[in-house]
Image (spheres, grey):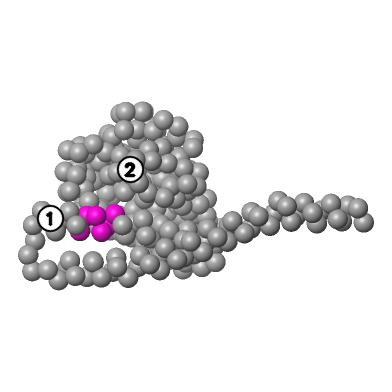
Amino acid sequence: MVVFYVTKLTYKSVTLPFLEKNQMLNTFFNDAMHELKTPLGVASINLEMLEFRDKHTHRIKGALRQMKVAYEDVEYFIKNERVNFPKEIINFSEFLRDRIRFSSTIANVKKISIEEFIADGLEIYMSKVEATRLVDNNLSNALKYSHPNSIIKVELVKDKNSASFSVEDFGIGIKDSAKIWSRFQKEDTTRGGFGLGLNIVLKICQKYAINYSVDSVYQKGSKFTYKIPLYKELLLDNIG
């Protein structure tokens, strides 16, 4: 009986406050998403309807695309534990080229060149939502931490049974590459963001058995590499 009351007291004093704070955090994120979705959509649609284009509209478009990446990170963070994102065969070569085109607007604002070497016809099997989060977070981080007038290298090649996808920048680098995968962790708080991106990437890597690594030198740049199982190899494994 004493053990029961001690356990109950411990639950109330330790577990309940944690659950309440977690619920408050989820409520905050849901409310924030609701408030942001409509104005973000309205701004994007009206910008596309403008009949003229100049450097100012280009910068606005770049800023809106940065906001879209952040918005989709928070949306995925809220939904991923209760939503089953359907998997499909993705031509990752074409998919990656498309995501680079999406990010090119942001790159142009900072006068950053994206150099790409992408092998054709590499297919993977995952949800497009999670493939987008994997790619967009890496491109977004490379752009965020690169210096103006620098370059970013994006590579996709076949490596044995994997599609080896890497993003390399020559920006500020990382002080502690072990901490960056933690939720809400940000090395440079002055550059914005929620600190969710690489934690989301980590969870996706764990879900799809993607081998991931980072090679970084502080003040010189970083290279993130992901070895994603190829669809044909997965198919053969299932047959075997």
Q: Residue 196 vs residue 173: left or right?
A: right
Q: How many numbered callouts?
A: 2
* Mark 1 Cα shell of 10 Å, populated few (<14), some (14-19), many (≥20): few
Indicate yes or no whether the magenta region holds residue 64: yes
* Mark 2 Cα shell of 10 Å, populated few (<14), some (14-19), many (≥20): few
User: Where 75 falls versus 159 (above or below)?
Assistant: below
Residue 154 location (% of width, % of height): 28, 44
**Residue 157 visible at all:** no
Residue 163 location (% of width, % of height): 38, 49
Residue at coordinates 17% horizontally, 48% vertically from top-left?
Answer: 108
- Reading the image, the residue beneath label 1 is 56
**Residue 217 visible at all:** yes
Residue sitting nearer the eye, 90 or 216: 216
Give the secondary structure at mark 1.
helix
User: Where 189 falls versus 200 (above or below)?
Assistant: above
> Which numbered tag is attached to residue 218?
none
User: What's the residue type where badge 2 is placed?
Assistant: Arg
Indicate the quadrant containing the N terminus: top left, top right, bottom left or bottom right: bottom right
User: What's the residue type where badge 1 is placed?
Assistant: His
Residue 45 location (% of width, % of height): 22, 70
Q: Residues under labels 1 and 2: Cα distance? A: 21 Å
Residue sitting nearer the eye, 119 or 135: 135
Residue at coordinates 41% horizontally, 45% vertically from top-left?
Answer: 226
> Which numbered tag is attached to residue 191?
2
Indicate yes or no whether the magenta region holds residue 160: no
Indicate the quadrant containing the C terminus: top left, top right, bottom left or bottom right: bottom right
Residue at coordinates 31% horizontally, 48% vertically from top-left?
Answer: 139
Give the secondary structure at mark 2.
helix
Residue 109 location (% of width, % of height): 17, 48
- In magenta, the rendered stretch is 61-66
How would you classify the magenta stretch by its main secondary structure? helix
